[in-house]
Image (cartoon, grey):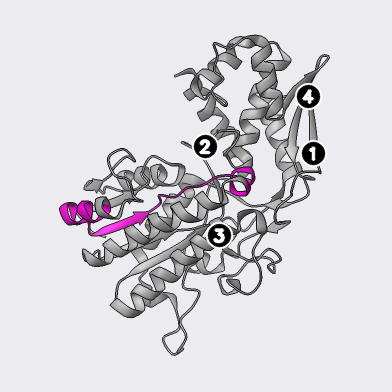
Amino acid sequence: MDKKAKIYIAGHRGLVGSAILKSLTEKGYDNIVCRTHKELDLTDDVAVAAFFDKEKPEYVFLAAAKVGGIMANFTYRADFIYDNLRIQNNVIHHSYLSGVKKLLFLGSTCIYPKNCPQPMKEEYLLTDVLEYTNEPYAIAKIAGIKMCESYNLQYGTNFLSVMPTNLYGPNDNFDLEKSHVLPALIRKMHLGKALESKNWRTIREDLDRLPIEGIDGTASDDALIAILEKYGVSIQGDTVNIEIWGSGRPMREFLWSEDMADACVFIMENRDFDDCYDTSTKEIRNTHINIGTGKDISIKELSELIKESIGFTGNLYFNTEKPDGTMKKLTDVTKLHDLGWEHKVELEAGVKKIYGWYTKNERA
């Protein structure tokens, strides 16, 4: 990519897109186009067509998506498949129509089968059934991969797909109803620590910034205790308990979002679609690239790590009546490593970094 080329980042305010924006800016790219959701609704085909016709970006990072944790995926199944398909269809199709030189579509490792062999190689896509709790989201992301491949094969476009593992970092979603496990645990234990010391100021500041079901810092102590208990932060006597869904046994891999962004820019600079498959084969499949660390940790171990990092001293309660989701999801990152890229931020350091970011922004 030329440093002066016009680059469009779809979803630049989210966890993924904001990290890509930062990475591009730090690398000297200075012709970057962004639009907020209010400025451009990516589910609106007419609006997306008008945007591409006006701006004519040369490169596109498709990081916009409706995302959430296990509770959100399970509850809002229709929204997750419908909204993500609309976003992808519009951006990919109009990238083709406007002559975009290269596009990077970002998916998720939830595309792989529930009982996928470990670590998960790109070639394991569509070899078995998906995990039920996030099946609609996974199907949307698989459709995005196949859409990129199909446009490349039929129209000669240069659309790439990457599948990052579980991400965390600046601008993460800390909404307790919709967040992924790591930011949810960060916020729960932050609130739990404040509840232990009866630090109502910290609790009120937290809910002023991120109200829970409309409950903010102006609510009564009783109302605050009730809403926190509903979302797994409860007090019994002098002990604060944090509820965590499932047994704690599932293994998960986590990648610092800014490492992910660096990998995405690296791939856009060094990879084309023709590099992603064996040209001698008649059936072109699995051209996507996994992005991860190749290391995992149990949810229980993650919880203990976060507990220690934050300084929470209460109890962790694993609610086995709630679903675990897939028991193990570890990416095989051989393809990425062979290209010459590896992650830099290890999980223990990353947890400290994200907690520091969260508390700094809470006080802002």
Q: CA distance from mark 2 to mark 4?
A: 24 Å
- Give the number of the disc on residue 318: 1
**Residue that label 4 marks:** 314
Image point (78%, 49%), residue name: 249
Amino acid on which disc 2 is placed: Asn
Q: CA distance from mark 3 to mark 2?
A: 19 Å
Q: Position of residue 280 (x, y in %)?
A: 44, 90
Q: CA distance from mark 1 to mark 3?
A: 26 Å
Q: Secondary structure at mark 4?
A: loop
Location of residue 198 with respect to 11 vertically, above or below: above
Q: How many marks?
A: 4
Q: CA distance from mark 4 to mark 1?
A: 13 Å
Amino acid on which disc 1 is placed: Phe
Q: Nearer the viewer, mark 1 or mark 3?
A: 3
Image point (74%, 51%), residue name: 250
**Residue that label 3 marks:** 138
